[in-house]
Image (spheres, rainbow, N blue to C red):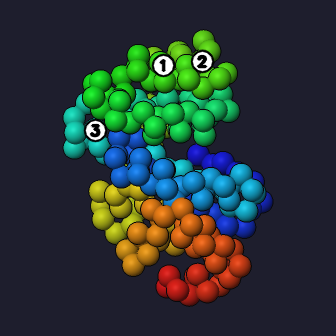
Amino acid sequence: MTVGDPQAKTVVRVYEDPRCPVVAEFEATGAKAIRAETLGRQVRTECTLASFKDVRLGGDGSKRAVNALRAALDAQRFTEYHAVLVESQEEAETSGGYTTEHLLNLAARVPGLRSEAFDAAVSSTKYGDFVTASQAAYQQTGDDPIGPGTPAVTIDAKMVSEKIYGNLFEEDLTAELLTTVRKNPVAWQLYRS
């Protein structure tokens, strides 16, 4: 899924599982800088949604959440709904996970999202093929056959390394990284090689 200016020269790809608590931490910190750059038309953000936490934690909450996020994209409310899901992650875990009922209740917090089409897509897991394809894309990322873990971030197709990964959890450091990449993309490519 892609948000932001399609003409933006800097492309950030974020890999997230909706049930991952580290994703919630990232979204409350460094992801704010990515959103600001995306809204400022400096960055195009692509999101690959994983559902590996279902295997590790049991249930199908990640798959249901990814399906609902895909339905929110059709309703042009992906960003708003994504924010609500992340903010409500702990609530979802303590109430049995991302059930259909819980996902619909959370959608009610996003003005203009609930509709007959959205509700039907969430209830029927209309985007099951998308969920499967997104998980497969996640697993093909990086060197580990089960995927890179979440959150994972690439900038201009280069994975943010362990060396600077911690910067992604500081809003100002993430903003600084994006500015550096934008001003000197050749140096970023060389640094990451």
**Which of the labelled discs sits on residue 117, or is there none?**
none
Q: Residues within 10 Å of mark 2 (few under 14, many from 20)?
A: some
Task: State left or right for residue 89 relative to residue 80.
Answer: left
The local secondary structure at tag 1 comes to helix
User: How far apart are the two marked residues, 1 and 2, measured between alpha carbons?
Assistant: 8 Å
Query: Which residue is painted at 67% across and 21% down in the image?
Result: 112
User: Mark 2, mark 3: which one is toward the viewer?
Assistant: 2
Could you tell which of marks 1 and 3 lies nearer the N-terminus? 3
Check residue 54 in the rendering and tell me which mark sits there, or answer none. Answer: 3
Answer few, some or many: residues within 10 Å of disc 3's Cα (few below 14, many 20 plus, some between 14 and 19).
Answer: some
Q: Give, as a three-letter code, the residue at label 3.
A: Asp
Residue type indicated by callout 1: Leu
Q: Nearer the viewer, mark 1 or mark 3?
A: 1
Q: Amino acid at mark 2?
A: Arg
27 vs 185, left or right, is left
What x and y, as percent, mark residue 117?
A: 60, 16
Q: Position of residue 12 (x, y in %)?
A: 59, 62
**x, y (%) of residue 111?**
65, 23
Look at the numbered discs 1 and 2 and tell me whether their residues touch, using CB distance below 8 Å: yes
Q: Residue 49 vs residue 56: left or right?
A: right
Query: Looking at the image, is 151 positioned above or below residue 55?
Result: below
Identify whether 159 is placed above or below 147.
below
Residue 105's place in the image compared with 135, above or below, is: above
Question: Who comes first in sequence, dot 1 or dot 2?
Answer: 1
User: Dot 1 corresponds to which residue?
Assistant: 104
Residue under the image location 60 percent in, 40 percent down: 79
Q: Mark 2 highlights which residue? A: 114
